[in-house]
Amino acid sequence: MKLQKIAQELDLHIRSGAGHMDKEVARGYASDLLSDVMGNAREGDIWVTLQAHQNIVAIAVMKSLSGIILVNNREPDALTVQKAEEENVPIMVSAMPTFELVGKLFTMGVAGS
């Protein structure tokens, strides 16, 4: 499933990487612990988190994630958005809490990693 379809169906607000929404999502991974994501997320995963600082971009690049969804209306700061744009990492924002968003992703056919 493409990021664009997920963003449309879940009413996500794109903060970076608008030109890269054609990326394919293989699976999903939800965690707020960066070391957990580094150790367990897989290439092509969409990452659901409430972390909004620059380090999320570095992890997404290192793990070749398809994108990042920030929950609870968390907003990335300007430097995080700038870094994400430089690295072609889509960051999207949702008003939903993690549990609800992950449930909706699962219902759409995005399995866990």
Image: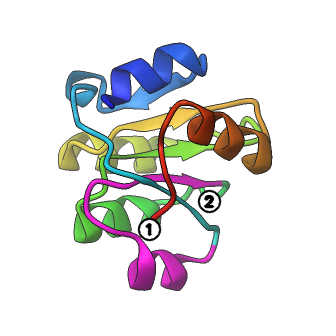
Residue drawn at x 65%, y 46% is 102
Q: Position of residue 75 (x, y in %)?
A: 63, 39
Q: Can residue 30 be found in the magenta stretch? A: no
Image quarter of residue 94: top right
> How far is the residue under mark 1 from the one under mark 2?
9 Å
Residue 55 got which mark?
A: 1
Q: Position of residue 9 (x, y in %)?
A: 54, 16
When the figure is inspected, residue 33 is found, relative to residue 104, above or below; the finding is below
Residue 86 position (above or below residue 92): below
Residue 82 lies, in percent from the top left, at 33, 42
Q: Nearer the viewer, residue 38 or 101?
A: 101
* 86 sits left or right of 92 in the view: left
Q: Which residue is mark 2?
A: 51
Q: How many marks?
A: 2
Say which amino acid is labelled 2.
Answer: Gln
Examine the rendering and report whether any part of residue 46 can be seen: yes
- Magenta range is 33-49
Residue 43 disc label: none
